[in-house]
């Protein structure tokens, strides 16, 4: 099958057929979207292997890249949290990038990769470095307009985009959720009045928050009950659940990181991550601590797989989300 270029959420053209990609930035939503764009340039069902960059050995990664997929087709090897992996194995990675295997595609997901480093230059020479940086505050309305048009087929005027940015802030995953709901429920152009009239939609969003609040408190039974209730009262819930749960996992990860790195107060974490009221931060932190780094990363991986299975028709949304809640 011929490979074609595609674009990520930021509008960056992802070049097809490259042996190495680096996804650079602090926003998991943008990295996930870029990874989806890379996957779209490969075969319909590439064999994907995800490894933890903080624990994976170099030999493990290179062996995967140099071996062929078990059932034929293409192989995609994704290294999460690759900053430490790159630092630890920089010379060997530079050697690999200089002569990459043709049996697999390597994707390095990292928070930072300065362009003046040799490894960054090497990747840019044979592959692609994709910046996964969120738009600045003044650029957010334009990002919303573009995302509405390209991903959801919505025409949205600037006043509507400004209002949505004010209501939600720079949480790109939540914005994308709201755009998906508008695409389902609105015929014609989206105006500021459309957004203002969507109080019910924001109320439903609060219901989704109540489900993740139950997860934060460790009450799985309540989370499942609220999920079942959501399905009965909100026809768009099935299309938003996976992204919403991913946002919750990402917030739990970010909250835990802030607590471990700077011992930030619950109020500071709530303000930074837009978690209100601040009393919700404590239970979220407790759940994040229980899951740990490995559990949080595993949850994101499970959601990525679940999203793909739902979109390709291999999973029923309601039971699939419920199984995720129970196993979390």
Image (spheres, grey):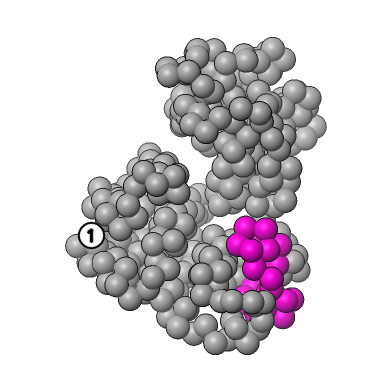
Q: Is residue 148 magenta?
A: yes
* Image position, residue 160 (x, y; %): 67, 79
Q: Is residue 35 above or below residue 45?
A: below
Q: Is residue 166 placed above or below 289 in the rendered structure? A: below
The quadrant in which the N terminus is found is top right
Tell me the element at label 1: helix
The residues colored magenta run 145-166
Give coordinates of residue 229: x percent, y percent: 27, 72
Q: Residue at x 48, y 50 (%)?
A: 257
User: Does any portion of residue 209 appear in the rendered image?
Assistant: no
Q: Counting other residues with Cα less than 10 Å from the Cα at mark 1, is it few (<14), some (14-19), or many (20 or more)?
A: some
Query: Whole-percent x and y of residue 200?
Result: 45, 83
In the figure, 306 relative to 219: above or below?
above
- Along the horizontal axis of the image, is 233 left or right of 113? left
Q: Is residue 47 magenta?
A: no
**Front-most of residues 254 and 72:** 72
Residue 298 visible, this orientation = yes
Main secondary-structure element of the magenta-colored stretch: helix
Residue identified by numbered label 1: 220
- Name the residue: 44% across, 62% down: 240
x 42%, y 68%: residue: 236
């Amino acid at each position: 099958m011929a490979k074609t270029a595609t674009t990520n959420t930021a509008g960056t053209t992802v070049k097809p057929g490259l042996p190495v990609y680096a996804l650079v930035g602090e926003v998991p939503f943008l990295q996930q979207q870029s990874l989806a764009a890379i996957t779209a340039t490969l075969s319909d069902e590439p064999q994907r292997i995800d490894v933890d960059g903080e624990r994976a050995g170099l030999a493990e990664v290179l062996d995967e890249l140099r071996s062929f997929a078990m059932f034929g087709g293409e192989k995609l090897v994704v290294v999460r949290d690759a900053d430490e992996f790159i630092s630890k194995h920089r010379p060997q990675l530079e050697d690999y990038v200089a002569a990459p295997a043709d049996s697999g595609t390597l994707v390095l997901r990292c928070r930072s990769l300065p362009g003046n480093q040799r490894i960054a230059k090497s990747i840019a020479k044979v592959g692609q470095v994709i910046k996964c940086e969120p738009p600045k505050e003044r650029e957010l309305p334009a990002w919303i307009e573009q995302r509405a048009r390209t991903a959801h087929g919505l025409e949205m005027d600037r006043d509507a985009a400004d209002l949505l940015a004010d209501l939600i802030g720079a949480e790109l995953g939540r914005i994308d959720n709201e755009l998906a709901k508008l695409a389902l429920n609105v015929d014609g152009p989206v105006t500021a009045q459309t957004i203002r009239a969507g109080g019910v939609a924001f109320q439903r969003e609060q219901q989704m928050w109540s489900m993740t609040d139950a997860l934060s408190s460790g009450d799985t039974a309540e989370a499942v009950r609220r999920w079942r209730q959501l399905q009965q009262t909100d026809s768009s819930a099935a299309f938003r659940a996976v992204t919403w749960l991913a946002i919750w996992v990402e917030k739990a990860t970010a909250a835990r990181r802030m607590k471990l790195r700077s011992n930030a107060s619950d109020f500071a974490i709530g303000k930074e991550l837009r978690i209100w009221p601040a009393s919700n931060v404590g239970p979220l932190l407790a759940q994040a601590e229980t899951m740990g780094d490995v559990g949080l990363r595993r949850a994101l991986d499970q959601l990525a797989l679940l999203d793909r299975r739902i979109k390709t028709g291999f999973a029923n949304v309601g039971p699939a989300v419920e199984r995720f809640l129970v196993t979390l």
